[in-house]
Amino acid sequence: MSKVWLITGATRGIGAQIARAALAAGEKVVATGRSSSKIEEALGPTDRLLALTLDVTDHDQALEVVRTAVERFGRIDVLVNNAGYGLIGAVEECSSAELADQFATNVLGVAAVTRAVLPIMRAQRSGHIFNMSSAAGIVAFPGASGYCSSKFAVEGLTESLAQEVAPLGIKVTMVEPGYMRTEFLESPSAVYAERVIDDYDSTAGAMRRGSRSISLKQPGDPRKLAQAFLTLASAANPPLRFVGGTDSVSFLEQALATKREELETWRHLSMSLGYEE
């Protein structure tokens, strides 16, 4: 039996590739984004596609999308929380408003759509939720404080969610892609802090320059990542964390080694903090 997928941020990039792969596999897809007409243009006509406009920061709109999806296809089997963008700038360069907008989309948007879908999956006692994290949810990079912190928050949300819904038959996976060759580093997916401080030129400045230079030249293939989503969605025991790409694997290996080294260096002090009567 074909699955029903609900995908956010499906106008272009990874979201559109996942939608294409699911449709090619015979699945039914509810593809959402800021413009339903652009989604239809990108994915083409088929009765297995329902394109809907969705701003993930609007919980009421998310509820309406879910209601429409269930009316059309009867259920929702897979949710892909893919919508998001990257804020580039040092902590001191990013304004409160810029950081708030980053979290509103990347974190609160994930929570809003998940809350809208969960009553359907709970009633079904089945479903699979994919939350899009990033290599920036594994390790932090200078000059991407807003984006990295939002993805670290998604990781914490996802780990808690997985434990909450496991007894209800719902699976949860966070996906941590590295650099994938999409338009993610182009506007409007990449947003640069308005303030630029010269003292951060070697860190945040380097991130700004590097992001622009690697855009549309990233080493990862989003089409292969989309196929990986299909594999994970059909797995009997999918992972909580899926590391996507050789660069992300390297980042995780480095992070684990660094944390282990720091733990051992400071173990004596860490273990000495127990209360003694």
Image (spheres, rainbow, N blue to C red):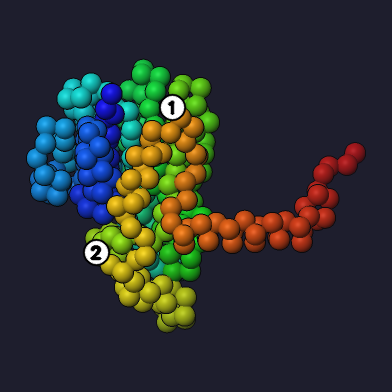
Provide the residue designation for mark 2. Answer: 187
Q: Quadrant of residue 263?
A: bottom right
Write the residue at 47% across / 36% down: 238
Q: Which comes sooner in the sequence, label 1 or label 2?
A: 1
Between residues 193 and 81, which one lies in front from this camera angle? 81
Write the residue at 62% across / 56% down: 256
From what the image shows, is residue 224 above or below residue 205? Answer: above
**Callout 1: 10 Å neighbours few (<14), some, many (20+)?**
many
Residue 50 point in image, percent of width and height: 16, 35
Residue 271 point in image, percent of width and height: 81, 49
Determine the CA span between mark 1 and mark 2: 35 Å
Indicate the secondary structure of the residue bearing disc 2.
loop
1 or 2: mark nearer the eye: 1
Q: Which mark is residue 170?
A: 1
Q: Tell me the kind of residue under disc 1.
A: Ile
**Left/right of residue 140 with respect to residue 218 in the rendered view:** right
Write the residue at 45% across / 23% down: 169
Q: Which residue of the protein is positioned furthest toward the right in this rendering?
A: 277
From what the image shows, is residue 230 above or below residue 258? Answer: above
